Amino acid sequence: MAPTDPLAGEIREDRLAAGYVFYGEEDYLAEEFIRRLKRALISPDAQGFNLERFDLAVMRWPDIIDTARTVPFFFSPWRIVVVRAVEENREGKEAREGKGSSRKLSSLDEKIIREYFRSPASRTVLVVVITGRVKKTHSLVKFFDSLSGGAVVLKEVRPLKKGDLHAWMMQRLASLGKSATPEALGRLEEVAGSDLRRIDRELEKIAAFAADRKTVDIEDVLQVCDWTKSFIEWDLAEALKRADQRQSLLILNRAFQEGVRPEHILRVLANFFRDLLLAKLWLREGRDRKEIFAFLKPQIKEAFVKLYAEEFKALFSLLERLSIGEISWAVRELEKIDFSIKTMDVSEQPLMETFVIEYCRRQQQPRERRSAIWKEKG
C-alpha cells in the first residue's frame, strides 16, 4: 500500500515509506511525526540504540547511509535515522536554490543516496528535516523529489494559519484529555503567536491547571498567563537555565520595549536565583527532591507525567551544574542592582544586561575555569 500524508492518520508499518523529507519553517511538525514513529515502531528500551540523529553541518552522507543500513538493535526490528539541515534564512534566488549551503550534495553523495533508495534497508525509516525558508526549488529538496519509485515522501511544513492552528491546538488538547472554547484558543494564539513549540508548552500547563475539568475556557488561559506573570517569567527562566546570553538579552529588551516595569523584571531575575539557592540548601540538608520540586513548582503536579518529568529533570540538572557560590554571587549582584536603582539616578536596562552577560559568560566556561573565576572575583 502507498504511504499516506505523514502528518495525517495513524502510523501503519505496511504504509511507511523508506524516507520522508520535511522542508520549511515549522519543523515542529516534523518532530511530531518523529515522536509518533518512535511510539509506533520502537520499544522504549531500544530507543537509545535504534533512533539516531545526525546534523548535516558536521556529518557526511556516506556515514549516514552506512548507519541506515546497519541492522537494528535486537530489542526492536525497526530503526529510525533522522538527518537535520538548518538552512540559513538567506533571501532571493540563492536561498531558493540552496546555493552556498553546506547541505549541497556532491556527485558522490547523490550516487550513494540514489543507490540506497533503489534498495532501502528493511524496517528502516530515514527522515530528513530541512529547516528554514526552504521551497521545493531548493537543491536538496529537488534531489529527493527526483528519486523514482515512491520511496521518498516530501512534505512542506509551513507555519499554521488561524484555522489550521486552532485545529492543531484542539488535536493536541484531545491527546491531553481536554477540549477548549473558541475564545480560549483565540486568547492563546494572542499570547503565543503561531510558535508550535511555545503553544505546546502552554497547552500542557493549561491542561494541568484545568485539572479534572474537560473543557478549557478563556479564564483558564488568563489564569495561567497570570500564574506565569507574562512571557518574561517562563522565557527568561528557560534562557537562564541554558545560560543563553543572546536569548536572555532579547527577552530583557523585549520586556523593556513593551513597558514591563524594571522592578518587576528585577524581581523575576532575583526570584529565579533565590529559588535555586533555597533548593541547593535543602539538597545539602538531605531533603527529598520531590518535596523540593513541589514547593518551588506547586502548579506542576506529578500526575501530569510529561511536563512534570521535563521540568523536574531541568531543575535538578541545573542545580547539579551550579555551585552554592555561583548562585550566591548572582543573588548578591542583583541586590546591588536593586540598591543602585533605589538610591541613584541610573538606567536599569544596562545594569540588568551587564549582569546577564557576566552570568552567561561564566556559565559558558569549563567547570574548572568557572571555579577559578568564582575564587578570583567572588
Image (cartoon, rainbow, N blue to C red):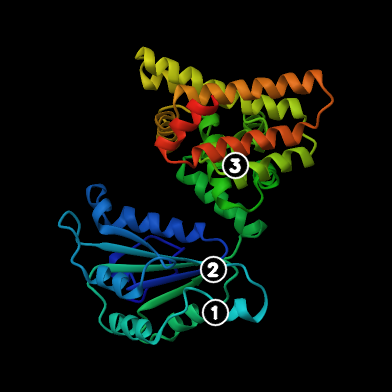
| Residue depicted at 40% across the width and 65% down the height | 58
Residue 43 location, x and y as percent?
24, 51
Q: Is residue 242 above or below residue 109?
A: above
Residue 223 visible in image: yes
Q: Nearer the viewer, residue 64 or 300?
A: 64
Q: Which residue was labeled with disc 3?
A: 180
Q: Amino acid at mark 1?
A: His
State the residue position of label 1: 138
Q: Secondary structure at mark 3?
A: strand
In which quadrant will I find the C terminus? Answer: top right
- At x 56% / y 61%, what residue is drawn? 26
Q: Earlier in the sequence, mark 2 or mark 3?
A: 2
| Viewer-side label of 3, 1 | 1
SS label for mark 2 = loop
Name the N-terminal-most of marks 1 and 2. Answer: 2
**Residue 34 circle label:** none
Closer to the observer: label 2 or label 3?
2
Gap in Å between the C-alphas at discs 2 and 3?
36 Å
